[in-house]
Amino acid sequence: MIMKKYLTKKPLYNKILSVYNSTQDDGYGHSCLYRFVYTVWAKSLHVVRHVGGVCCSSDNSWPIFNGRDKMSEKQHNTWTPENVQLLFKRFSNHLLLRRGLAPYTIEGYCRSLSKVLKDLNTLNPTHDELEGHIAWMYGRKYSYNHLVNTMLAIERFMEFMENPIRFGRPKKPRRIIPATLSEAEIAVMLSGCKNIREKAIISLLAYSGIRNKELCCLKVDHVDLGNNAVRVLGGKGSRDRVVCIPGDCTNVLLRYLNEYPRNGQDYLFTTLKNNNRYGGMDLRKLVKTVAKRAGIKKRVYPHLLRHSLATNLIGRGANLLTVKEQLGHAWIDSTMIYVTSRFQRIMAEYNNFAPSYL
């Protein structure tokens, strides 16, 4: 087998496999790295093929560097589609095996890095060029998140290139949640849905507060209609959780499943034309269309419904820990943003205790 052939030649892979073999009896201690190695080594030997000097799975989802795709100094400095593809395959492999990063994080780093290297027109940038680019981003008033993500991508890449660089981080600004939707506005959106499918999607977003990607990945058996709950598996940070939904939302989902019957392992929401899994862009387009139809002038997107749920729960007096668990936040500080962003609550407290000067 090709995969076995290259794994036996590489001490790094032999070491990884030995670590896996020594821990395979531990059903709960496997990291994503061990699961990845197991998938490639134990399950996918029959579908592994050799493509352009790189061992890949049959769907090209994870390239595995086998030592034969080294780039010359001239290739490192030449911006061509072939060189870019080869370099990014090696960089992705480095982030996966050496850093243990999630596929979504790797995709984000590669996207940020691609823009930087394209702007600099080189695959082997110098420290001066990179520092100049970051200074240019500061001058263009890029957001804090954009700046930090670009810095991280550059630092990981230069570490991979064995020419490390480190940037100072800007001070994190205190965020204020943008104007959220009131209960009345969400009710208008739900009443403006044209069919039960639209109503089920908007209801689940509004009542559960799950993220865009989490809703797209939901399967039918993840929804516990008897207990008014939804199991979110593999959410942000690879964290699983159970979120609550009210009986009204459950009734809408029951009507939806009655009209669009599905099996337990089917995705809960799919496209109408090809019955494919619902995508992030599809969801954003649907939410925008429903909001426009309802006459809402604000910019409405799926994550705004999550913000709105948190704000409305806190406005009704919900416990912060309850909101934290519902939203799946890792830290209570993330939930506190909704308290500091709700000026009506602060105003009510202030009016009760404001001194009387006049």
Image (spheres, rainbow, N blue to C red):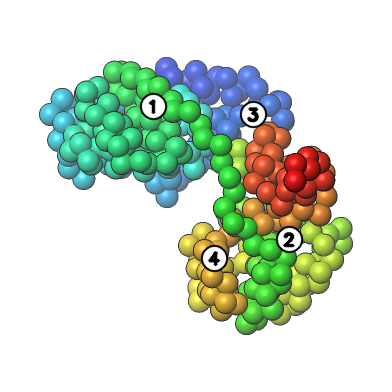
Q: Is residue 250 left or right of residue 284?
A: right
Q: Which amino acid does label 4 sit on?
A: Lys
Q: Distance between the residues labelled 2 and 3?
A: 34 Å
Residue 77: image x %, image y %? 16, 31
Q: Residues within 10 Å of mark 4 (few under 14, many from 20)?
A: few
Quadrant where the N terminus sits is top left
Q: Which amino acid does label 3 sit on?
A: His
Which numbered disc, 2 or 1, marks the residue that appears first in the sequence? 1
Q: Name the residue under label 2.
A: 207
Mark toward the viewer: 2 or 3: 2
Which numbered disc, 3 or 4, marks the residue that appears first in the sequence? 3
User: In percent of the image, x 75 and y 70: which residue is there?
Assistant: 253
Q: Mark 4 points at which residue?
A: 298
Q: Name the residue under label 3.
A: 30
Q: In this view, does 94 lie to the left or right of 284?
A: left
Report the label total.
Answer: 4
Q: Is residue 160 visible?
A: no
- Nearest the viewer among 182 and 274 is 182
Residue 254: image x %, image y %? 78, 72
User: In percent of the image, x 56 and y 37: which residue is there?
Assistant: 174
